[in-house]
Amino acid sequence: MINIDERRVRIALIVPSSNTVMENDLHNALPIDRYTVHTDRMYLVETTREAEIRMIEDFARPAAADLGTVDPDLLVFGCTSGGSLFGLEYDARICADLGSLAGCPSLGVVSAAAEALDRAGARRLAVITPYVDDLTRSVATALSGNGRDIVAAHGMGISVNVELADPTPQDIVRFASDRLKEEDFDTVFVSCTNFRALEAKPELEAHFGVPVLTSNSAVIDGIRQRFNDVRQAA
């Protein structure tokens, strides 16, 4: 748990420039009397491995340095696929570097997801994403291990980052229901901070009858864990 004084907790959030979902999810889920969220952006148009590597190498560090001026309590690197490119250790290394620049501890989405899956006791994991196959495999690989098997990983094939937010929660439920109808799993992870998966989470859990975690729910719960706030993301 991170200790702070009596003021509200300041969350420094770095997202791809074309992300239109994550800020809203955090603002809606984190009580304003307890948290404030402060965002900077990393230029990104395409959702591909090459574009995300350029985003991290060219734009992540200046964003973290900018956010350091608000004296944050926690920095969140808000890109699931970017953090997954070379596994969990890569995500942790990026976040440690960015947190150092911002002057605070840090949290990556992939690391938050792994923590949430551990808490849920996930063993047979199904992964749903809006991504192209390469990034879908990258996220699934990063979340495998530690007693978890990936039994299915399916992506919608969207390669333009702003368009990741286009599928409605109902679209997400339909896609997951169709792709996972013959799979045997005990947990579902729905990836991407720019995907309306948090809104789809209750219906997905009702449909599948298993825990469903999303990128943004994992970050929200990770933030609350760090500040001794026991409420869970809806």
Image: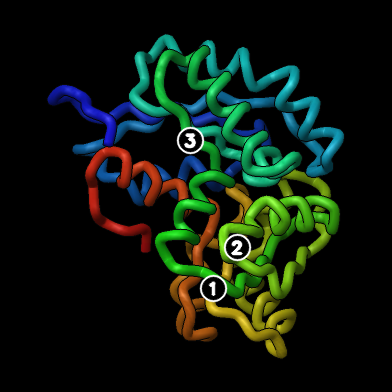
Residue nearest the observer in this picture, 44 or 150: 150
Mark closer to the observer (2, 1)? 1
Q: Are marks 3 and 1 in contact (CB under 8 Å)?
A: no
Q: Is residue 228 left or right of residue 47?
A: left
What residue appears at the point 83 percent right and 60 percent down from the top-left corner?
A: 157
Q: What x and y, as percent, mark residue 66?
A: 52, 12
Inspect the image, locate mark 1, and give the three-letter code of the amino acid beneath it: Thr
Q: Residue 37, which numbered label?
A: none
Inspect the image, locate mark 3, and give the three-letter code of the amino acid beneath it: Leu
What residue appears at the point 44 percent right and 73 percent down from the top-left corner?
A: 202
Mark closer to the observer (3, 2)? 3
Task: Determine which residue is flagged by label 3.
Answer: 107
Using the image, determine if residue 101 lies above or below residue 18.
Answer: above
Task: Determine which residue is flagged by label 1.
Answer: 187
Q: What x and y, as percent, mark residue 45?
A: 78, 36
First in sequence: mark 3 vs mark 1: 3
Task: Determine which residue is flagged by label 2.
Answer: 190
The Cα–Cα distance between marks 3 and 1, rounded to whole angstroms, is: 22 Å
Inspect the image, locate mark 2, and give the three-letter code of the amino acid beneath it: Val
Tag 3, which secondary structure?
strand
First in sequence: mark 3 vs mark 2: 3
